[in-house]
Amino acid sequence: MNLAQLLLRQARVAGDRIAILEGTQPWATHAQWAQRSASLAQHFQAAGLQAGDRVLLFMRNHPRYLEVLWAAWWAGLVVVPVNAKLHPTEVAWIVENAQARWAFVTSDVAPDPIAGLERQVDVESPEAAALFMGRPDLADAVPWPSRPDDTAWLFYTSGTTGRPKGVMLTHRNLMTMGLTYFVDVDPVGPGDAMVYAAPMSHGCGLYAIPHLMAGARHVVPASGGVDPAELFALGRALGPLSTFAAPTIVKRLVEHAEAQGLTPDGCSASFKTVVYGGAPMYLEDIRRALRVMGPRFVQIYGQGETPMVGTVLSRVHLMDAAHPRHLARLASVGTAQAPVEIRVVDERGRALPTGEIGEVLVRGDSVMAGYWRNPQASAQALRDGWLWTGDVGCLDADGFLTLKDRSKDLLISGGANIYPREVEEVLLTAAGVAEVAVVGGPDPEWGEVVVAFVVAKAGAAPTADALDAHCLERIARFKRPKRYVFVPELPKNHYGKVLKTALRAQLQGQAA
Ligand code: AMP
């Protein structure tokens, strides 16, 4: 089992069809893609890279991303796609930890040599062009016979608590993820197109796998990133696009559609499906998104350790407004995806009854093989075949999972557990509030107090008193923020996740 077979298969059955585009410009057919990847694979082998060796990608979204991924798999290598916003010293740490031999970069992301590599290739250089230029006979250039449990992708966690860990994702994990897309997320056909606006080093890039399986097109925006106007225009030019976006990106798309006065029908010309996940989507935000852009959303919940596969909130469930528990479902992350089981357990791993809050466990073929050269962390995360996600939530009688928070984000004030997300959901319904993040601030009397960081809507100026009154009408007194901090924006990482650690550190700094 080798993911590279997916490319060879399309090169044979649909070799002449455009597979990759940069903006609206064709970049490669399936046959050209396969030949370039097979060519680079031959160079890897000629340079002495052995099956299982690591190749790093540290670059902005680029059509070459896809060619390098499949070249590495073709040669039986392991890819290490790295967040393009990391600091050079963080990347050097990953190179060292993964013992990566080669790296592929773009010069905007990596202008300088990264320590510890045998070779660093700028994908826009003539050197790179030569590597992709061979025209191997595809009948002879057979992908390396990888086994299902061989690692294909070493996915470094964001490391908000200590050093990042390398999640070993196997060919089987990623095949499972790809096939599950069609069952749980969306059917795909050759006429469809996946656009890579969010970082390809993360979930968005993983979705290249189902789209290659289905022979669809892969579109890298000319900007290499998220520009709502560009994306809407690309969709109109190429046909409705599918994409994966963190909730913050969804928000930007919705704001753009609103500002342009687009109707849901108008939006359907640009987008077929927007899969969202990776961070909490608040009830208010998804309701607005559905109102403005129409039925083109699907939510997934997963994590690097079970990539893109955990639960799904389907298009049908998102649109089923007549259901008596519709709003509760909108606020949930949906039900278990086809290849996995989900459990909510207490600290000792005992399954909890419906409605009780505990840690979320996942079991199935999408779950990682373990952490790279870290048996201790692996044993901690994988127990009796179950992945302990570190997420906290509860299941309802129909199997819908509602996440509360990461266990480390839980806030304990005067001995009472408070889930920040619940407070955030309430504050987002208050007038003038655009974004909010609730964290615990140190307090000599209460241990921790609830502090809300609030971003106001343009032209609005919500006051602490007004927000307090709003909360008093809707949640228990003890859950109300004791303090409001009004900020122009929230700190976020490259994947759009709010950096609560940074907010907590800010409060700790102030207290000290
Ligand atoms: P990562 O491994 O970087 O993809 O981060 C995974 C984490 O993001 C999960 O463990 C959750 O805490 C969070 N997450 C992922 N999907 C969702 C979602 N749909 N809703 C809320 N949080 C999510």
Image (spheres, helix red, strand yellow):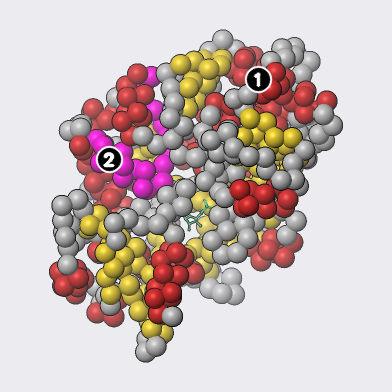
Furthest-front residue in this view: 112
- Please determine whether, in this image, residue 5 is positioned above or below residue 439: above
Rendering coords of residue 83 (x, y %): 55, 45
Crowdedness near tag 1: few (<14), some (14–19) or many (≥20) residues, C-alpha within 10 Å: few
Q: Nearer the viewer, residue 130 or 450?
A: 130
Marker disc for residue 136: none
- Please determine whether, in this image, residue 308 is positioned above or below residue 511: above
* Span shown in magenta: 238-257
Residue 246 located within the stretch drawn in magenta: yes
Q: Earlier in the sequence, mark 1 or mark 2?
A: 1
Furthest-top residue in this view: 16
> Which residue does the image show at 70% across and 35% down from the upper left?
120
> Which residue does the image show at 74% across and 35% down from the upper left?
119
The residue labelled by disc 2 is 254
- Please determine whether, in this image, residue 91 is positioned above or below residue 200: below
Left of 298 or right of it: where is 61? right
Q: Nearer the viewer, residue 51 or 222?
A: 222
| Secondary structure mostly taken by the magenta-highlighted segment of the chain | helix
- The total of numbered circles placed on residues is 2
Residue 436 located within the stretch drawn in magenta: no
In whole angstroms, how far apart are the C-alphas of marks 1 and 2? 40 Å
Query: As shown in the figure, which amino acid type bears the numbered disc 1?
Result: Pro
Marker disc for residue 126: 1
Query: As shown in the figure, which amino acid type bears the numbered disc 2?
Result: Val
> Which residue does the image show at 35% across and 40% down from the upper left?
297
